[in-house]
Amino acid sequence: MDSTSHRPFSCALEAPADAIHNETFNVGSNGQNYRVKEVAEKVAKVFPGCKQTFGSKGSDTRSYRVNFDKISKHLSEFQCEWDADKGVEQFLRAFPPD
């Protein structure tokens, strides 16, 4: 996989049963579709001494841009509490540099 592919990151949602019963949702924000390279850059910025390298384009051309419009229509007050930056900060706390 090269660094230009999009990849989804998962999260959980608590919502009223009557609003989500028998429905499937992509949980997130359209503004938070990240390329692998973008996430790697965020990690490198936060972890001291992190060196990032990217491979060449290979045979895996999969890329996933996810649409989150449905969740906004069913749950009008839904907003993401987390983004990639906050997730990277959580990793830094969980795996502090030596």
Image (cartoon, rainbow, N blue to C red):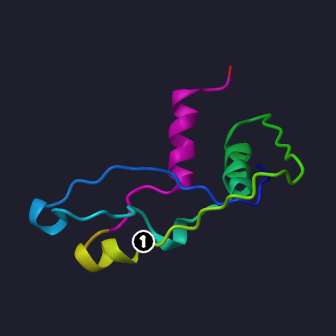
Q: How many marks?
A: 1
Residue situated furthest top in the rendering = 98
Q: Residue at x 50, y 39 (%)?
A: 90
Residue for badge 1: 68
Would residue 23 appear left or right of 96 to someone viewing this image? left
Q: Position of residue 54 (x, y in %)?
A: 85, 47
Does residue 4 appear anywhere in the picture? yes
Q: Secondary structure at mark 1?
A: loop
Q: Position of residue 75 (x, y in %)?
A: 24, 72
Which of 26/60 is in front?
60
Q: Callout 1 environment at 10 Å: few (<14), some (14 to 19), or many (20+)?
A: some
Residue 94 shown in magenta: yes
Would residue 5 appear left or right of 65 to someone viewing this image? right
From what the image shows, is residue 40 above or below residue 38?
above
Q: Quadrant of residue 71?
A: bottom left
Which of 49/36 is in front?
36
Does residue 76 appear anywhere in the picture? no
Q: Residue at x 29, y 69 (%)?
A: 78
Would residue 69 appear left or right of 75 to someone viewing this image? right
Residue situated furthest right in the rendering = 56
Which of 93/16 is in front?
16
Magenta segment, which residues?
79-97
Residue 17 shown in magenta: no
Q: Residue at x 68, y 58 (%)?
A: 62
- Amino acid type at circle 1 is Phe
Q: Residue at x 53, y 72 (%)?
A: 31
From what the image shows, is residue 66 above or below residue 72?
above
